[in-house]
Amino acid sequence: MKFKSVVEILDFAIDKEEEAAQFYKSLATKAEHWTMGKAFEDFAREEVKHKEKLLKIKEGKLLAPAVEKVKDLKIADYLVDVTPSPELDYQEALILAMKKEKASFKLYNDLATSTDDSNLRNTLLSLAQEEAKHKLRLEVEYDEHFLSEN
């Protein structure tokens, strides 16, 4: 990805956050467990908050950098990709969501390296850590429901 300006980076990230929010809203309606349905709704709200943060940055506001790195269980690294479909079961939805969060984490890290603006870089790295938190929560859920049974 090659961006010509900070505004292009922010617009791209804003679009991705909107897509992610819609994705989680859709998964929330398909979740087998009400707790995971609620979790997907929470993720959708988090993605909307990320979008709002990016919009504030676009207006010139600064955000604090992340203070800690989130643990990575790497469960998503060893799972087969799932194709989105209306018939996703709970396990497939979790896999898809984990892979999506992993991609979002990578996206924010990549976007951070594409700018010389240190404030924007810190913000993007902070958003990457928030995506890593989502992935960790999904991996823990997957581990409890599918790996612990085997």
Image: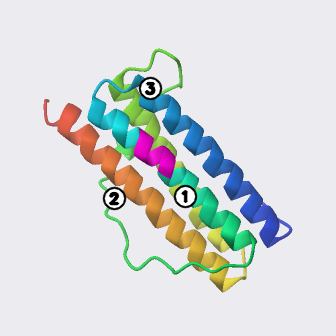
The answer to which of 106 and 136 lies nearer the viewer is 136
User: What distance separates the C-alpha of mark 3 from that of mark 1?
Assistant: 20 Å
Residue 140 percent across, percent down from the top left? 25, 47
Q: Given this view, does label 1 or label 2 mark the residue nearer the observer? A: 1
Amino acid under label 2?
Asp
Query: Going by the image, does 111 lie left or right of 23?
Result: right
Task: Please state which amino acid type lies under the numbered disc 3.
Answer: Thr
Q: Which residue is mark 1?
A: 49
- Residue 79 in view, yes or no: no
Q: Which residues are magenta?
A: 41-45
Say above or below: 113 vs 79: below
Membership of 32 in magenta stretch: no
Taking the magenta stretch, the answer to whether it contains residue 42 is yes
Identify the residue position indicated by label 3 in the image: 29
Compare marks 1 and 2 and give the one earlier in the sequence. Answer: 1
Amino acid bearing label 1: Lys
Asked whether the residues under the numbered discs 3 and 1 touch, taking CB atoms below 8 Å apart as contact, a structural biologist would say no
Q: Which residue is mark 2?
A: 72
How packed mark 2 is, by other alpha carbons closer than 10 Å (few <14, some 14-19, many 20 or more), is: few
For the stretch drawn in magenta, the main secondary structure is: helix
Q: Residue at x 27, y 38 (%)?
A: 142
Q: In the rendered structure, are the residues bearing label 2 and label 3 in contact, judged by CB atoms less than 8 Å apart? A: no
Q: Is residue 126 above or below residue 94?
A: below
Q: Secondary structure at mark 1?
A: helix
Q: Earlier in the sequence, mark 3 or mark 1?
A: 3
